[in-house]
Image (spheres, rainbow, N blue to C red):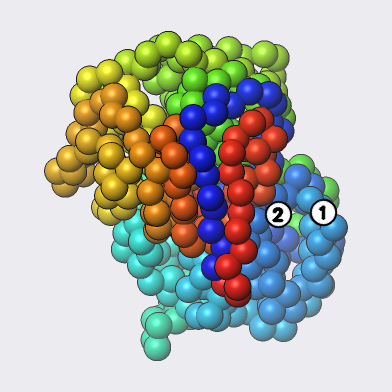
Amino acid sequence: MDRFVVTGGVPLKGSIAVSGAKNSALPALAASLLTEEPVVLHGIPRVRDIATMVSLLGSTGARTQVEGGTVRIEAARITQPEAPYELVKTMRASSLVLGPLVARHGRARVSMPGGCAIGARPINLHVHGLEQLGAEVTQSHGYIEAAAPDGMRGAVVHFDRITVTGTEDLLMAAVLAKGETVLVNAAREPEVTDLADLLTRMGARIEGAGSSTIRVVGVDRLYGTEHRIIPDRIEAGTFLIAGAITGGDLLLTECRPEHLTALTVKLRQAGVEVTVEGSSRMRVRSGGRLRSVDMTTEEHPGFPTDLQAQYMALMTQADGISLITETIFENRFMHASELMRMGANIRIEGRQAIVAGPRELSGAQVMSSDLRASASLVLAAMVAKGETIIDRVYHIDRGYERIEEKLAGVGGNILRVREGRE
Ligand code: EPZ
C-alpha cells in the first residue's frame, strides 16, 4: 500500500489546474448505458473510482475506450445487466447503473453496497423511486433485482430526504419512462445539473435540474453525444484550504467559482483572502492569523459534507473555538482522532466537533480511513512541524488525481512511497 511522506511548514505558492469532477463523471458514465450509440466524455479525472466504473460498464457488455481524460462508451448491447458484489464493495456509486439498466434493458441485478466508513448509506430511496416508476424490485442474497420488462411509467417521486445519487439514478430511469415524471425534493448539486445537461444532449426532455423539483418527459430512445465534465468543486475546495492552512498564495485554474460560494464565505469570515478571477480562476491568499468560524454541512448550495474534514483541519489553526456540525452522514469524523494524534484540540459530541485553536500540529504516522479524511490529513501534514507519514493513500487515489504531484508543483514537500502491492 502506498504512503505519503510529508514535511510541513512550506507556504504553497503557484497555480494548480483543477481536474474534472469524479462525482459528475460517475453518473455521466452510467448514463452512457441509456443508448446504443457511442457517448464520448471529456475531462474525466484519472482516479480509481473512474477505473472501477469503466470496468463495471465493460462487464455489462458495453465497449469502453479510455484515452487520457477522454472516455468513449458504446453500449450497443447489454449482455450482463449486473453490478457484482466484488465491484460494488469497492465503490458504492456502482448503484448508479441501477436506473439506466432497468430503463434501457428492462432489468438489473445490483449488489447492495453495504455500509462504508462514513455511514450505513442505504439505497432505499433509489429502490422506492424505481418502484414508483413501476419497476418490480426484490432483494435477495445481498442483491437488488429490479425489473420493468414493459418499460417504466412516469410518476411523482418524492424523496424522503435529499439524495445526490438517488436523484441521479431516478433521473436516468425517468428519461425513458412513458409519460411525465416529477422528482420532488431532488438534490441540487452541480453534478446533478451536469448529468441533466448530458442527458438533454442525448435527447432527453428535462426541466428544473439544479432546483428541488425536476420534471422529465420520457422519450422513446436516446442518442450518442460528446460532453465535457464540470470541474471538481471538492478538489478545488481542498486546494483553497491548502493555500489557506499553509499561509500561501495559490491560483486555481479551470475551476467554477460559483460552485464554491459556501466555502468562500467561510474562508473570508476566517480572514482568508479569496478572489474570483473571471469564470474559471480563483486565488487564495493567507498570511495572517485565522479566525475560528462555525460551520454546518448541508446539501448544496450549503457547505458540502465532502469539505468538512478539510475545513476541520483548517480550524485547528484558527483562533478560538469553532463548532463543526455534520448533518449528512452519521459517522464522518474519523479524521478527528488522527488530527488529535498530530496535536489538534478537538472534542466530538455526536454530530458536532468542537475545535479549539490555534494548536501547533506535529508530524506523526497517521492512517487514512476514507477519501476526504485522507485529504484532511494531507492538509494537516502540510502545516505540521516535522514529518508525517500517511498510510493507505489508496483512499485518496479514489478521488484525487495525482494530488501529491499537484501539491509538490506549488512547493509542497510531499512524496509518494510505493509500499509493495496495494
Ligand atoms: C454523494 O453520495 C457523493 N458521491 C458523496 O461523495 C457525497 O458525500 C454525498 O453525495 C453527499 O453530498 C457521489 O456523488 C458518487 P446521498 P450519495 O445519497 O449520493 C442517506 C465523496 O467523497 N440516504 O446524497 O451516496 C445517506 O445515508 C463521496 O466523493 C438514505 O438514507 O449520498 C446519507 O445520510 C462521499 N437512503 C444522506 O442520505 C438512500 O437511498 C445523503 O446521501 C440514499 C441516501
Q: Quadrant of residue 106?
A: bottom right
Percent position of residue 277, x then y: 67, 13
- Inspect the image, locate mark 2, and give the three-letter code of the amino acid beneath it: Arg
Quarter where residue 319 is shown: top left
Question: What number is the disc on residue 196?
Answer: none
Q: Which mark is first along the chain, 2 or 1?
A: 2
Above-or-below relation of 275 to 236: above
Disc 1 packing (10 Å; few <14; some 14–19; many ≥20) = few
Q: Position of residue 29 (x, y in %)?
A: 69, 58
* Residue at 52% across, 44% down: 6
State the residue at coordinates (48%, 73%).
89
Question: Residue 68 got which mark?
Answer: 1
Q: Secondary structure at mark 1?
A: loop
Q: Quadrant of the C terminus?
A: bottom right
Residue 237 seen from this side: no
Kind of residue sitting beneath label 1: Gly
Q: Is residue 356 visible?
A: yes
Q: Give the answer, above or below, for where 95 lies relative to 45.
A: below
Where does label 2 land, which residue? 46
Q: Quadrant of the N terminus?
A: bottom right
x%, y% of residue 47? 65, 56
How far across and how far down the image is residue 262, in percent? 44, 24
